């Protein structure tokens, strides 16, 4: 499974940005797609996830501001980020796993597949 993240950039506080994560390869067995982020000097943290049935879950820090969704083919997953704040500045990584349970998609030590990161910078 290969994951390709895109869409990062520089945005002012209060602004919005949409990230994309395209999956390819043997994705039929993938049951959860997730987003994590890593701010400078901090550990990677889970942000959001969408499981194969469509259920979504969010970290408390982004709940109500971020929305994770996917295209009809389920190959591309998006992270719509609104009301961005400077503390959202981080490298965002998309992830995937065959196991749609925590900690397999929420703990970076357990996640099986990673895409490369895309940098989101929020200026104040």
Image (spheres, rainbow, N blue to C red):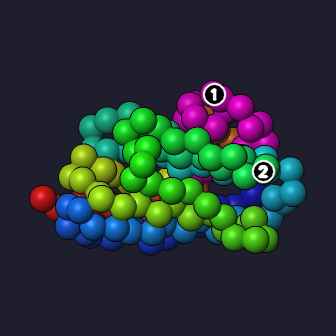
Magenta segment, prevailing SS (helix, strand or loop): loop
* Mark 1: few/some/many CA within 10 Å (<14, 14-19, 20+): few
Element type where label 1 sits in the image: loop
Q: Is residue 96 visible?
A: no
Tag in front: 1 or 2:
2
Q: Could you say which quadrant of the image residue 8 lies in?
A: bottom left
Q: Is residue 59 left or right of residue 68?
A: left
Residue lying furthest front in this view? 64
Q: Which residue is mark 1?
A: 103
Of residues 60 and 22, which is closer to you in this image? 60
In this view, 109 is above or below 73: above
Work out whether mark 1 precedes mark 2 in sequence or the reverse, and give the earlier one. Answer: 2
Find residue 54 and report its horizontal and vertical position in percent: 73, 52
Find residue 36 and report its horizontal and vertical position in percent. 49, 46
Q: SS class of the residue under badge 2?
A: loop
Q: Is residue 111 visible?
A: yes
> Does residue 124 appear left or right of residue 15 in this picture?
left
Could you tell me residue 71's position as x and y percent?
A: 69, 70
Up the image or down, 90 lies above or below 70; here it is above
Quarter of the rendering occupied by the C terminus: bottom left
Residue occupying image coordinates x 21% and y 52%: 86
Disc 2 marks which residue?
A: 52
Quote the CA–CA distance across marks 1 and 2.
16 Å
Labelled pair 1, 2 in contact (Cβ < 8 Å): no
Instruction: Name the one closer to the observer, 91 or 19.
Output: 19
**Where, by quadrant of the figure, is residue 91 drawn?**
bottom left
Q: Which residues are magenta?
A: 94-109
Say whether residue 102 is magenta: yes
């Amino acid at each position: 499974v290969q994951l390709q993240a895109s869409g990062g950039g520089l945005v002012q506080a209060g602004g919005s940005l949409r990230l994309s994560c395209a999956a390819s390869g043997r994705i039929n067995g993938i049951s959860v797609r997730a987003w994590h982020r890593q701010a400078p000097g901090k550990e990677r943290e889970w942000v959001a996830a969408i499981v194969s049935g469509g259920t979504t879950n969010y970290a408390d820090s982004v709940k109500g501001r971020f929305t994770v969704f996917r295209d009809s083919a389920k190959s591309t997953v998006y992270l719509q980020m609104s009301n961005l704040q400077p503390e959202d500045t981080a490298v965002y990584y998309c992830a995937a796993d065959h196991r749609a349970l925590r900690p397999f998609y929420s703990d970076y030590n357990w996640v099986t597949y990673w895409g490369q990161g895309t940098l989101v910078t929020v200026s104040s």
